[in-house]
Image (tube, rainbow, N blue to C red):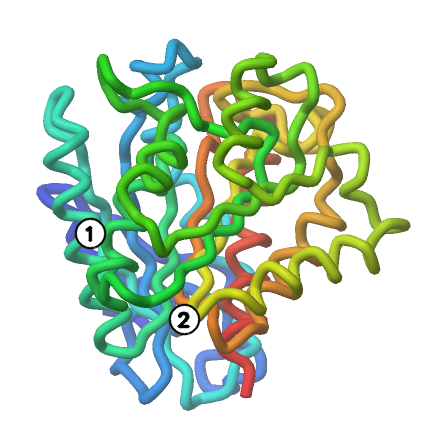
Amino acid sequence: MSSNERERVVGTQMFQWSGRVDSETDPSTFRYHQVVNEPRQNKFVRLIGFASEEGVRRNSGRLGAKQAPKFVREQLSSIPWTLPSEVSIEDAGDIEIQGNDLEGGYVKLKQAVSETIQQEGLAIVIGGGHETTYGNYLGVREALGEDVKLGIINIDAHYDMRPYDQQVSSGTMFLQIQDEDPNASYCVLGIQPFGNTTSLHNVAKDYDVTVMEAAEVTMSNWEKIKRQLQEFMNMQDAVYLTLCVDVLNTAYAPGVSATTPLGIDPFITNKIIDYVMQQNKAVSFDICEINPTYDRDNQTAKLGAYFINQAIVARMNP
């Protein structure tokens, strides 16, 4: 196989990493597709796809998010790889949901994330709908143990704390986690006041969720955002960051399951990712709700790839 074509078996499918090559020998010119799946180093990143939209379907959202891992990888392929040689990256392929068996998918994602963290790697999960988060959380919790104080930071327009007595979905995960895990705390940035019912706002208050609304999540307000994040992270032993791309203004991210006309911009989103993932406490990152069916010229998928790159660079730089 040539150095600019890395293949990875994904079930019965084959994902091929390829892209522009400026040099076959000069590492300073290399891009993701030239380094992915090279021999593992002491510090490594593992990409895990969660090709699911079952949670979105159950939540009555627009379908198409299960295609996102493929489209995001395609955009990630040609981004320059800027990390030193002691950092490697591998693609673990996609976990695919069989029929409507979201719960079976969670078992597989839990195992993949847990193994990555136990091997001291950085888990990067590419969703899929935001139901991805529950499976990622299960893996993080299994790897860390039940007594570790885990802070979950969610960049999102929605609380995703709907009742789950009938079924779980992409709108229930954080209530599930809060009910099941006394050592998990929840912080959400980017909430849309009119994108959530009064009942959901009340649930967030009842569970003492740390909340910052979208109007506050701006570059001009960065110092306040940073203080709130730091105060939250200081109370945790470990941190897990999740990004629901529907938090972004529709002008920047048209390809999502639920659009947000008054959403936040990519610059502050990138800054939050950079700040959180620089912390030694950060163990996992996922990106959810990219929907290629509604994207324009892969605009949202490319943005997602940039966010993933930022998370990796922030966490893995010496």
**Residue at screen point 15% across, 56% down:** 111
The image quadrant of residue 273 is bottom right
The C terminus lies in which quarter of the figure? bottom right
**Residue at screen point 16% across, 53% down:** 9
Q: Report the front residue among 66 and 109.
A: 109
Q: Position of residue 45 (x, y in %)?
A: 36, 70
- Label 1 residue SS: helix
Residue 297 visible:
no
For the residue marked with disc 1, what is the amino acid? Lys
Q: Which mark is residue 110?
A: 1
For the residue marked with disc 2, what is the amino acid? Gln
Q: Report the front residue among 19 and 302.
A: 302
Q: Position of residue 110 (x, y in %)?
A: 20, 51
Residue 82 vs 160, above or below: the answer is below
Q: Position of residue 104 (x, y in %)?
A: 10, 36
Compute the Cα span from label 1 to label 2.
28 Å
- Label 2 residue SS: helix
Direction right: furthest residue: 220
| Image-based side of 229 in relation to 160, left or right | right
| Image-based side of 231 in relation to 226, left or right | left
Q: Which mark is residue 163?
A: none
| Image-based side of 257 in relation to 302, left or right | left
Residue 249 visible:
yes
Task: Check disc 2 and report the residue beneath it.
Answer: 34
**Residue at screen point 53% across, 65% down:** 235
The N terminus lies in which quarter of the figure? bottom left
